[in-house]
């Protein structure tokens, strides 16, 4: 009796597993899915988890990678607003936003078909936007005059609008200019223009530098003149004070010439002894003769 029971249990488990595989399916975090009923898309699934379905041929599940995919278009030539040929290539990051719209639009959800369509849309949008801008907006000696950010936004807006109008189920996450180039026929002309613009920029910077240098020199000369004037005024004041003091002392010296002579000799000695100098001198030589009586009296003691 045990063997038939085990066989029945194993058989039941296999039937359950087979039924589970037939009537359920799983969508991972990195996937989106579309369920078709008799070949027509009827359900779009964008959240991960387990779901029920009818077995084939009633229903069938198609899964797609929902992660961002990077695509680059070809390096193509376009005409700028000032009639210059320019080679450009752009890259985009795109993902499937609506699998139910994406599936029938591209032959059962073919990624290759989607990228072929995307290449055409990018080419048209890129050509339209390049034609709105001057060549100097793409290539310029002054980086502040480049308009890459605005150009990329314009291309993205056109591409996104066309994809939504056609209900492709695709969403563009980012777009950027990968590289730009010039045909050989216009390369030298552009280089000459860039050289000319660089010379103009250098000349302008030199003129601005010279003007600033003149401004600094003028300011320095003005400050020097102010300092010299202040110093001259202070010197005049000091001379005036000295002359006034001398005018007060002069009558005293005129009445007593010996006192004036003694004062002058003392000042000369003060200057000579200012740095703690050791002197060897003749006491008979002025102004050291002031010590003559002092040394004689000290020797007598």
Image (cartoon, rainbow, N blue to C red):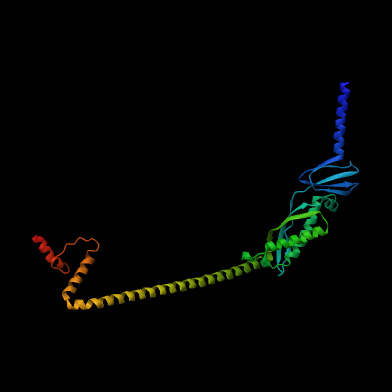
Q: Can I make out residue 87 in this image?
A: no
Quick check: 185 above or below 25?
below
Q: Which of the 4 quarters of the picture holds residue 5?
A: top right
Q: Which of the 4 quarters of the picture holds residue 148?
A: bottom right
**Quick one: 122 or 195, which is closer to the camera?**
122
Q: Is residue 133 left or right of residue 200?
A: right
Quick check: 217 above or below 77?
below
Q: Is residue 231 left or right of residue 270?
A: right
Q: Residue at x 85, y 37 (%)?
A: 20
Question: Residue 178: image x %, image y %?
Answer: 69, 57
Q: Can I make out residue 272 in this image?
A: yes
Task: Report the label total.
Answer: 0
Quick check: 167 above or below 205?
above
Question: Residue 222: image x %, image y %?
Answer: 44, 74
Q: Residue at x 68, y 59 (%)?
A: 179
Question: Residue 45: image x %, image y %?
Answer: 82, 47
Residue reaching furthest top? 1
Looking at the rendered image, the quarter that the N terminus falls into is top right
Looking at the rendered image, the quarter that the C terminus falls into is bottom left
**Quick one: 186 or 105, which is closer to the camera?**
105
Q: Residue at x 77, y 52 (%)?
A: 95
Residue reaching furthest left? 300
Q: Residue at x 77, y 54 (%)?
A: 171
Question: Residue 50: image x %, image y %?
Answer: 81, 41
């Amino acid at each position: 009796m045990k063997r038939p029971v085990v066989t029945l249990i194993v058989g039941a488990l296999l039937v359950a597993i087979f039924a589970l595989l037939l009537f359920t399916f799983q969508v991972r975090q990195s996937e989106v899915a579309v369920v078709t009923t008799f070949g027509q898309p009827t359900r779009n699934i964008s959240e991960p988890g387990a779901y029920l379905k009818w077995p084939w041929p009633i229903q069938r599940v198609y899964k797609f990678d929902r992660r961002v995919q990077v695509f680059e278009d070809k390096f193509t030539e376009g005409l700028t607003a000032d009639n210059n040929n320019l080679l450009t290539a752009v890259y985009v990051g795109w993902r499937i936003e609506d699998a139910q719209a994406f599936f029938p639009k591209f032959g059962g959800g073919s990624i290759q078909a989607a990228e072929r369509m995307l290449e055409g849309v990018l080419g048209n949008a890129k050509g339209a936007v390049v034609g709105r801008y001057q060549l100097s907006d793409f290539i310029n000696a002054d980086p502040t005059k480049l308009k890459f950010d605005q150009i990329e936004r314009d291309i993205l807006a056109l591409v996104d609008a066309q994809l939504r109008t056609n209900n492709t189920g695709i969403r563009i996450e980012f777009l950027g200019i990968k590289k730009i180039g010039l045909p050989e026929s216009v390369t030298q002309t552009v280089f000459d223009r860039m050289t000319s613009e660089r010379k103009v920029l250098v000349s302008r910077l030199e003129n601005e530098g010279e003007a600033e240098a003149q401004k600094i020199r003028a300011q320095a000369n003005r400050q020097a003149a102010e300092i010299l004037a202040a110093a001259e005024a202070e010197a005049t004041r000091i001379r005036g004070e000295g002359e006034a003091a001398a005018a007060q002392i002069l009558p005293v010296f005129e009445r007593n010439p010996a006192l004036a002579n003694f004062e002058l000799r003392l000042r000369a000695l003060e200057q000579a002894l200012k740095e703690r100098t050791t002197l060897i001198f003749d006491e008979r030589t002025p102004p050291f003769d002031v010590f003559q009586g002092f040394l004689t009296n000290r020797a007598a003691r």
